[in-house]
Image (cartoon, grey):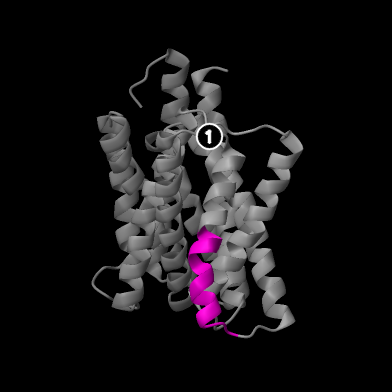
Amino acid sequence: MTIQNQKTKGVLCIVTSAFFFAVMNVFIRLAGDLPSIQKSFFRNLVAVCFAAAILLREGKREPLDREKLFWLVLRSAFGTAGILCNYYAVDHLVMADAAMLGKISPFAAILFSWLLLKERITPLQGLAVGAAFCGCLLIVKPTGMGMEAFPAVIGFLGGVAAGAAYTIVRILGLKGVRGPFIIFFFSAFSCLATLPAILLDYHPMTLVQVGTLLLAGTSAAFAQFAVTAAYRYAPAKELSVYDYSQVIFAALLGFLLFRQVPDALSWAGYLVIFATAVGMFFVNNRTGKKGDAAF
């Protein structure tokens, strides 16, 4: 498979994951007033079942050593923290704003890729990510307009944790750990980590809430498989801008289902992000045809 084909597959996977993550957040919000930990448990319970079914069907053993186990545990810890923070932000902020706060993850992923994988960041990539960050500022409006400070900080921290988790997914992929096993380990870890808190403070749920959370888990499972594949196909710096498509999906779903209407600054931010993503796509295609690795 050529490098350009790898990039194209990575982009398709990251956009697919963005859509399903946006759908997941809709179901999380529709589930109502339940603790984020309880929502996280059900989300990951579905992912465990999906991943376990795939592993059983493949019938292959996953050879592990201490180094791989270390990265699996670290990826799972960061991933669990990211989910809990994201669910809290989704419940307390406008969906598009919560999605954008989570989209700090590509910046964090690029930073962690530089720290852990020693991947070089080119000037063009830096400009593209910087433009996306400007779009982020337009939507988030850091002066505090229309946003609660505490949920915003929690959402930001969730994005940083997710960026670290995605970078470690690539490390595990380079070490030969299969995607379904990464998802299974992470989901099982998250379920076990949140189970004690649920047993101590369980909130009764209606059948509708249970069904909604199961749908959230199903959407998350599709998204997780897609994002895991994406970061195995290409490095974070080549996929970061495309991950912002989740904000577009979140804005559309927020309007259609909850009548949330972003203001003028938010729309300007969406435009900046979309234009940056399109520009990066064409530049990647052009440089790929020339065999240039600058972008």
x%, y% of residue 184?
59, 48
Q: Is residue 102 left or right of residue 144?
A: right
Q: Is residue 201 above or below residue 2?
A: below
The reply to whether residue 143 is in sight is yes
The reply to whether residue 260 is in sight is no
Going 41% across and 21% down the picture, which residue do you hit? 287
x%, y% of residue 136?
34, 57
Q: Is residue 230 left or right of residue 109?
A: right
Going 29% across and 76% down the picture, which residue do you hit? 149
Q: Is residue 100 above or below residue 130?
A: below
x%, y% of residue 248?
51, 57
Q: Is residue 195 magenta?
A: yes
x%, y% of residue 99?
45, 62
Amino acid of disc 1? Gly
- Give the quarter of the figure containing the C terminus: top left
Identify the element where label 1 is drawn: helix
Q: Which residue is mark 1?
A: 10
Q: Is residue 27 left or right of residue 131?
A: right
Q: Is residue 122 above or below residue 83?
A: above
* Front-lying residue, 260 or 268: 260
* Front-lying residue, 16 or 83: 83
- Give the quarter of the figure containing the N terminus: top right
Q: Is residue 241 left or right of residue 62?
A: left
The residue carrying pointer 1 sits among few (fewer than 14), some (14 to 19) or many (20 or more) residues within 10 Å by Cα, namely many
Q: Residue 236's image quarter?
A: top left
Q: Which residues are magenta?
A: 190-203
Q: Is residue 234 magenta?
A: no
